[in-house]
Amino acid sequence: MDGVTLGQIMEVAAWLVGAAATLGGLCKLFNAGLKVALKPLNDKVDAIADNNKRIELEAHKNFLVRFLADVEQGQPIDEIERERFYEVYSRYTSPELGGNSYIHNKVEKLKSAGKL
């Protein structure tokens, strides 16, 4: 440390602070540009997720309507079918999918009648 002046140390410190600020600014610019560039891709991924949710909801609805009609008509229901019904019904009525109330009403009606 012989021959190093306080002024030189301050100069190096100022250079390091400036370099850090410049890198920080460049990172912000890069992130902003990346966000703009990825927006169309993010929008497509969101649309695919929404479509998958809609398809899942419709598939569950089809299964539940058919199952409940079988129960109402007195068709024999296997224990595995009953377990699958409760799995699908639970997913269908989850907050994520938020299934229709007419399915819920039918389930309650069949439960009251002792069929479910």
Image: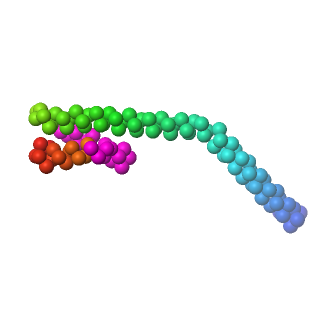
Q: Magenta region's main secondary structure? A: helix
Is there any visible trace of residue 2 in the rendered image?
A: no
* Place of residue 30 in the rendered image (x, y in percent of width and height, measured from the top left): 69, 44
Residue for point 72% across, 52% down: 24
Q: Is residue 105 left or right of residue 21?
A: left
Is there any visible trace of residue 92 in the rendered image?
A: yes
Residue for point 38% across, 34% down: 55
* Place of residue 96 in the rendered image (x, y in percent of width and height, measured from the top left): 38, 46
Q: Nearer the viewer, residue 67 or 46?
A: 67
Q: Is residue 23 left or right of residue 93?
A: right
Q: Which residues are magenta?
A: 80-102
**Colouring chosen for the image of the structure:** rainbow
Residue for point 76% across, 55% down: 21
* Place of residue 47 in the rendered image (x, y in percent of width and height, measured from the top left): 50, 37
* Place of residue 106 in the rendered image (x, y in percent of width and height, measured from the top left): 21, 44
Q: Magenta stretch containing residue 83, yes or no?
A: yes
